[in-house]
Amino acid sequence: MKGSSRRAPQRKTSEAISAGGVIVRPGTRGLEIILVGRSKARTWGLPKGTPDGQESLSETAIREVREETGVLPHIVDSLGSIEYYFTARSTRIHKRVHYFLMEPAGGDLSLHDEEYDLVEWVPIDDAVDRLTYPNEASIARRARDRVLGPLADNVAAGEG
């Protein structure tokens, strides 16, 4: 039809927020963090989730990390946030995930819930390479740099 303009149907949009953490500990092979994964989907990520009710971001991060990893975390510092878009049920969702640097204060990996079938302590540089999404890898690197300080790049390169 000449002169008519057709518009694509408007897609619904929504905002979503989550919080999670990078649990760090010294290990036999250097600094380690916990990754969560799904063997069927072959994905690896950092533990995170959505607030329940009026939970604060830090309360959400502690609960979600404990549920998904079995480890009771203690928050050390904020690591900032990442954001991304995805589509679910024809709605475009803008998601922001706030991450915290954490250390283990109890618990055990064997106590994790069923959301992920893979939960492992991984040397941090291996974890950065294993993480499925680059924005989560940047959070893991930020945690490494925060813990190791200005020597982080030298330690990661095996020079430290």
Image (tube, helix red, strand yellow):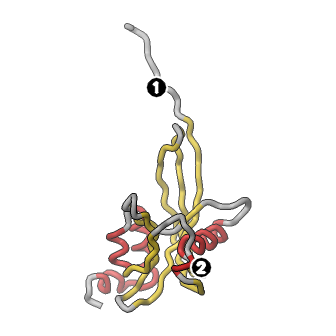
Q: Is residue 1 above or below residue 21?
A: above
Seen from the viewer's position, the closer of residues 153 and 132 is: 132
* Residue holding disc 2: 75
The answer to which quarter of the image holds residue 146 is bottom left
Residue drawn at the location 42% of the way across and 72% of the way down: 140
| Mark 1 and mark 2: Cα distance apart in space | 45 Å
In-image side of 83 versus 15 (left or right):
left
At x 62%, y 73%, the residue is 62
- Secondary structure of the residue carrying numbered label 1: loop
Q: Is residue 160 shown above or below 156?
A: below
Res. 113 visible in picture: yes
Q: Residue at x 65, y 61 (%)?
A: 51
* Three-letter code for the amino acid on which mark 2 is drawn: Ile
Q: Residues within 10 Å of mark 2 (few under 14, many from 20)?
A: some
Q: Residue at coordinates 40% horizontally, 67% vertically from top-left?
A: 138
Q: Secondary structure at mark 2?
A: strand
**Which label sits on residue 8?**
1
Q: Position of residue 113 (x, y in %)?
A: 57, 70
In this rendering, the answer to whether 72 lies above or below 91 is: below
Q: Quadrant of the C terminus?
A: bottom left
Query: Identity of the amino acid at label 1?
Result: Ala
User: 148 and 97: which one is in front?
Assistant: 97
Q: Quadrant of the N terminus?
A: top left
- Residue 33's quadrant in the figure? bottom left
Looking at the image, residue 24 lies above or below residue 45: below
Q: Position of residue 30 (x, y in %)?
A: 37, 88
Label 1: how many Cα within 10 Å (few below 14, some 14–19, many 20+): few
Is residue 133 in view? Answer: no
**Number of numbered discs overlaid on the protein picture:** 2
Mark carried by residue 141: none
Residue 2 image point, x, y percent: 37, 7
